[in-house]
Image (tube, coloured by chain):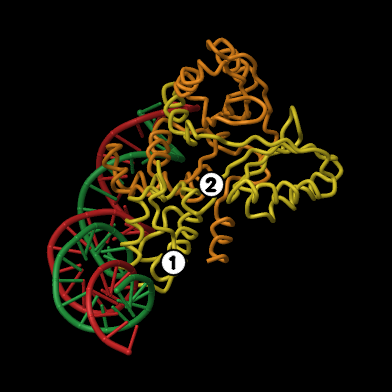
Chain colours: A orange, B yellow, C red, D green
DNA sequence: TCCATAATTGAGCAGGAAGCTCAAAACAGC
DNA sequence: GCTGTTTTGAGCTTCCTGCTCAATTATGGA
């Protein structure tokens, strides 16, 4: 999928920000909150949705369209006494999209977005410097074969019931 | 958070199914599609949202409320000639929520939900039997410290613009 | 089997949003 | 300073929302 994206301006970003926080927000509500005419927001919303930047009616957004082309999964081995502070520090980084504590290899798993590999390196260095972090292991996401979906699972539950 | 969930009936599941497929669906539209009174759907929707089963206005649902208490991340090493067929097979399993092709350790990463550890074992065995799968490595998600969020990243982009 | 409790339904109601068009005004970039 | 895009406000019809209430079904327990 080539990037035909006409670059998002700050108004688009403000709109996306509100939509990722509340996918069911009403157009007119958004317009008020942005200080724009209802008509303007309506047009931009439709444009974002048609361009595939806002997917699935607002559940998901296209990070690449925001300029974050790199997605990585990072497994972190942590000194358990520092686990809380490491998690808190991760929470303060915008690039960190999701954090789980796990069993198995490593203690913390996180999903990270970055503008490019250089940017990813910066994030990784930041993480490695956190007190308590012993080792990290990074996997680059090369392609998204199945985007997150809960539908089939719900349908499956339905069959049991 | 203890499970106070009053168990979801099939109507709830039908409703959830439609909402995960379209978080911006209108109540009256859902009512039509379910063959229920608008009032009924409205009440159930509110109940699900208040119970925290439908989070973030429909973006996300509580898998544990569906009876899927186990979440795991599985890294799969695959014979590259069979990669497509492995991915396709994963796509046919409801338990598989998300699949990425990755660099680094393993070739395919996926997120899997299961009812319990026994159920997880079944899913794992199924995966291991797929032609082309060489080895898997599983990490159990113990706790979700930071649920998926794109907001901070969008806000960060906004600062640059 | 019958009763009590809960769920569903349909109706009604006021307020408002959706989706659309159009012409004027503001704001670019060149 | 001019041209093309974007935004705005107004208008319009249709439909949705969120709520209440009484009546009608289920649903389960005793």
Q: Is mark 2 on a helix, strand or loop?
A: loop
Residue A160's tag is: none
Residue B93 falls left or right of residue C14: right
Residue A61 falls left or right of residue A141: left
Q: Is mark 1 on a helix, strand or loop?
A: helix
Chain letter of disc 2 in the image: B
Chain letter of disc 1 in the image: B
Q: Residue at x 41, y 48 (%)?
A: B3
Q: Do the residues labelled 2 and 1 touch (CB within 8 Å)?
A: no
Q: Which of marks 2 and 1 is in front?
A: 2
x, y percent for residue A92: 44, 21
Closer-to-camera residue (C5/A3): C5
Q: Distance between the residues labelled 2 and 1?
A: 21 Å
| Residue picked out by circle 2 | B69
Closer-to-camera residue (A152/B66): B66
**Can marks 2 and 1 be said to lie on one chain?**
yes
Q: Which residue is drawn at 80% across and 44% down?
A: B83
| Residue picked out by circle 1 | B11
């Amino acid at each position: 999928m080539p990037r035909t994206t006409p670059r998002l301006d700050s108004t688009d970003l403000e709109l996306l920000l509100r939509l990722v926080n509340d996918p069911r927000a009403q157009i007119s509500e958004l317009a008020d909150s942005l200080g724009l005419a209802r008509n303007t927001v309506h047009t931009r919303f439709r444009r974002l949705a048609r361009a595939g930047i806002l997917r699935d009616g607002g559940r998901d957004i296209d990070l690449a369209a925001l300029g974050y082309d790199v997605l990585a999964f990072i497994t972190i081995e942590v000194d358990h006494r520092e686990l809380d502070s490491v998690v808190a520090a991760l929470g303060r980084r915008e690039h960190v999209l999701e954090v789980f504590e796990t069993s198995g290899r490593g203690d913390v798993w996180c999903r990270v977005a970055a503008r490019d590999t250089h940017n990813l390196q910066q994030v990784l260095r930041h993480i490695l410097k956190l007190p308590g972090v012993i080792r990290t292991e990074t996997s680059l996401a090369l392609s998204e074969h199945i985007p997150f979906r809960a539908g089939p699972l719900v349908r499956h539950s339905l069959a049991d019931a």
